[in-house]
Image (cartoon, coloured by chain):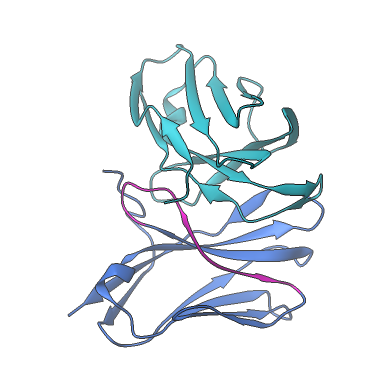
Chain colours: A blue, B cyan
Amino acid sequence: GESVGLHLPTLSVQEGDNSIINCAYSNSASDYFIWYKQESGKGPQFIIDIRSNMDKRQGQRVTVLLNKTVKHLSLQIAATQPGDSAVYFCAELLGGTDKLIFGTGTRLQVFP
Amino acid sequence: ETGVTQSPTHLIKTRGQQVTLRCSSQSGHNTVSWYQQALGQGPQFIFQYYREEENGRGNFPPRFSGLQFPNYSSELNVNALELDDSALYLCASSSTTTPVFTDTQYFGPGTRLTVL
């Protein structure tokens, strides 16, 4: 299958621990942000999104935090599981456009 | 599963050839976007089609072109292939309620193109 993220930053966590993946976005005019998970051989899978009028949004086991002052986005995964192992990308959508701009990605490795 | 399919899964071409990649969007999604993902990098936006017309383009040369059809399918065509075109090509479908607001993009599994 497709091998994604051969030289990406890697976060290694123990199963059951919480994970925090960080992302710096590039454009202060971006008004929509998405986290995607990409497993080997698959396309990016939507996890959670947040709009610029919010600073926090929660999903099932995941939380996204947005700090517009420093253009920073984070994804928190609670009780990390082996199935969470993948490459995680943040993406921003510039207001008034339909062009998603992806960050470089972080590989999450979960060990028992 | 996202309901977005792509074909073929893998493809090998030689430099200078032309290639057509296909995507079938989720039913009801009027917008399709195409991305190029080089190994170890995030996807890069190629272009987007909304109601069968190009609705935005990234920094890709004109030899990258596309079509969108009324039946929720679309194509990405690349002419005069170069070695650097080797990548995973992803399509993503979404529902756009206005020309400037796009709902979440759902990705297909991609087509792996190798140019020799």
Q: Quadrant of the N terminus of chain A?
A: top left
Q: Residue at x 59, y 43 (%)?
A: B93
Q: Residue at x 54, y 20 (%)?
A: B78
Q: Position of residue A6 (x, y in %)?
A: 32, 54
Q: Residue at x 66, y 36 (%)?
A: B47
The number of numbered discs placed on residues in the rendered structure image is 0
**Direction from residue A51 to residue B8 in the image, left or right:** left
**Direction from residue A32 to residue B84 in the image, left or right:** left
Give B14 or A59, whichever is nearer the viewer. A59
Q: Position of residue A67 (x, y in %)?
A: 67, 81
Q: Quadrant of residue B77?
A: top right
Q: Position of residue B62 (x, y in %)?
A: 66, 22
Q: Is residue A90 magenta?
A: no
Q: Is residue B112 at all visible to an observer of this figure?
A: yes
Q: Is residue A98 at all visible to an observer of this figure?
A: no
Residue extending farthest to the left is A112
In the image, the segment drawn in magenta is A39-52
**Direction from residue B97 to residue A42 in the image, left or right:** left
Q: Quadrant of residue A55?
A: bottom right
Give B79 or A8, whichever is nearer the viewer. B79
Q: Position of residue A68 (x, y in %)?
A: 72, 78
**Direction from residue A7 to residue A36 in the image, left or right:** right
